[in-house]
Image: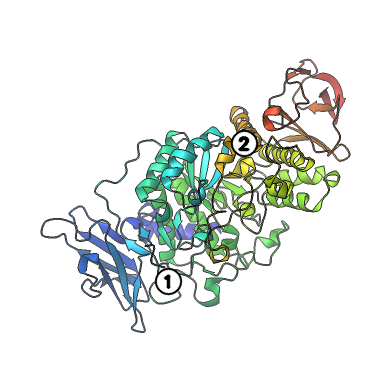
Amino acid sequence: RYSLFYNHLKNIEENEGGLDEFSKSYKAFGVNQLVDGGIYCKEWAPGAEAVFLTGDFNGWNPFSHPYKKMEYGKWELFIPPGQDGNPPVAHGSKLKVVIRAQNGELLYRISPWARYVVRDEDKVNYDWVHWNPPQSYLHKHPSPKRLKSLRIYESHVGIASPEGKVASYKNFTYNVLPRIKDLGYNCVQLMAIMEHAYYASFGYQVTSFFAASSRYGTPDDLKEMIDIAHSMGITVLLDVVHSHASKNSEDGLNKFDGTDYCFFHSGHKGTHQLWDSRLFDYANWEVLRFLLSNLRMWIEDYRFDGFRFDGVTSMLYHHHGIGTGFSGDYNEYFGLHVDEDALCYLMLANYMIKFLYPECITIAEDVSGMPALCRPVAEGGGGFDYRLAMAIPDKWIQIIKELKDEDWNMGNIVHTLTNRRYEEKYIAYAESHDQALVGDKTLAFRLMDAEMYTNMSVLSPLTPVIDRGIQLHKMIRLITHALGGESYLNFMGNEFGHPEWLDFPRIGNNESYHYARRQFNLTEDHLLRYRFLNAFDRDMNKLEERFGWLASPPAYVSEKHEANKVIAFERAGLLFVFNFHPYQSYVDYRVVICHGSLIVVFKYKILLDSDAEEYGGHQRLDHSTEYFSEEYPHNYRPNSFMV
């Protein structure tokens, strides 16, 4: 694999002037303003017989501005400035690339490199709009330094409002970013930014890879949003979709030049069976140029601080993970079923990002457990910084769905939370956007279900269902945060147990926005119990910020007691003790400390208590109590104390 990567890198150095020049291609392709006022246009359309540019600037004459055919399927066009020196294509004017296909058909297409596309209310398809404002937004604040402890707030701009509508970049900037900061998250991961014609696809059916979604505002609005986030010390990651593309041809990449092999594999190999989308041909030189340039554009133009690569499992294997289980056997990761070209692209992408922007962060969404995916490329690894610990949310769902409380297996919980490849960093999470979508349930909804509609008011009785749900919601998140990885992720709203599910407007729900929103206002109502969960999540993050357990070595688990339903472990100098027993509390319960000596006596105090009144607990513990270690062997350790 490293040999394949090295050969690609060597070819780029010898034939393209190096990775720096190769990945700057986004500045040449598409329609670009020149310093002298002229316009330079360039496209890759290997299956085209002829290529033209048309639009408002020439009265939509399809043949007045033909491109010149170059080598390797490339086409270019230069349009000089007007007699008055002004650009021939005005800012805000509409454009189309006209392709004469091999069968003679004329195809009106949006450039794959288009920076801004919009859809009028009375239209189905998007239009390409030339974006070249006289004064673009200028970033004022530097990007934050690379974080040691990553606490990620997974977000979707369009649903980030209690109102039933598509929310804006401006709304996110001034209403949501302060909330993220207050909750103690230091990183926001933005979904559905790359333009997608179908809103309900959650941004995963991308149609225009270089365009920021216009349904939330302008490119400058997004730049301002990222700049303000940086001013707050918040790192901003883009959820990038390079694993597949929308099948749309009128306003997408599909059949751009009239063939089914431009950008994608031809025939059956080029279609994802489950997603009904097109699959990139990562062995194609121009596809590599397109995708690497895409990453660089988002970093340089918008100042994103890194990427969460979606659908990595689908990229890594020719079977795309469909109908395949992964047990950890190495035969599952090495063989002819692995798509080495896709893996080589990921290595190139990570190498380029780290080479040009060492502070950038990359995350892999891989469910398979591919070995060395998060090791440096120089070691033959994939080059990612983190991978998502995708087994953890599945485990919590399985436990809550299938087991009685008294049947919870402490050893199994600990195993799932600690089962990760040595020296590969994992992002732990109890739930993400996947669990919030219609057809699934969030942890809060699984725990409390219909009673969330009637018993979340403090004026109503604290029923056993609500009491259990609130307490387990906090405990599940804290043990996942502290034991599950080297980073933590939460999907917006889930921190306070957002009621109901997430469903975008579609024909099946009469195009309703009722479930395509986040009711942040619920946490501001002091008569509702949502504020308890919100406060606990905030203080949990603030405690991690203070002690940095995510950046510390893995925890030492000193107890997983099946009868008592107790888990205890140490990490970053803190002792975590969880009692998952459904009805049994303990007095004088002995727990060990791992770092003490036989001479020094250590004093402990409570820092975070899920049973505290401000978190909706029963306040059964006295926080003024001091706990002293003693030379008393327990669980094969010389020192312990009682709680």
Residue found 42% across the figure and 77% down from its top: 259
Height in image: 546 above or below 120? above
Q: Could you tell me which quadrant the N terminus lies in?
A: bottom right
> Badge 1, how many Cα within 10 Å: few under 14, some, many 20+?
some
Which residue is labeled 2 in the image? Answer: 534
Q: Can you give x and y, in whole percent of width and height, for residue 456 in the image?
A: 68, 40
Based on the displayed image, in which of its 4 quarters is residue 111 positioned? bottom left
Circle 2 crowding by C-alpha within 10 Å: few under 14, some 14–19, many from 20: many
- Residue extending farthest to the bottom is 103
Disc 1 marks which amino acid? Ser
**Residue 35 x %, y %:** 20, 52
Residue at the image position 67 percent from the left and 28 percent from the top: 614
The residue to which callout 1 is attached is: 249
Residue situated in front as seen by the camera: 399 or 23: 399
- Res. 143 in view: no
- The quadrant in which residue 33 appears is bottom left
Residue 397 or residue 615, whichever sits in front: 615
Label placed on residue 72: none
Q: Is residue 491 left or right of residue 421?
A: left
Pointer 2 or 1: first along the chain = 1
Q: Residue furthest front?
A: 459
The C terminus: image quadrant: top right
Q: Pinpoint residue 516: horizontal percent, then vertical percent.
A: 54, 53
Residue at the right extreme of this rendering: 563
Q: Is residue 456 left or right of residue 65?
A: right
Q: Is residue 90 visible?
A: yes
User: Residue at point 40% right, 65% down?
Assistant: 286
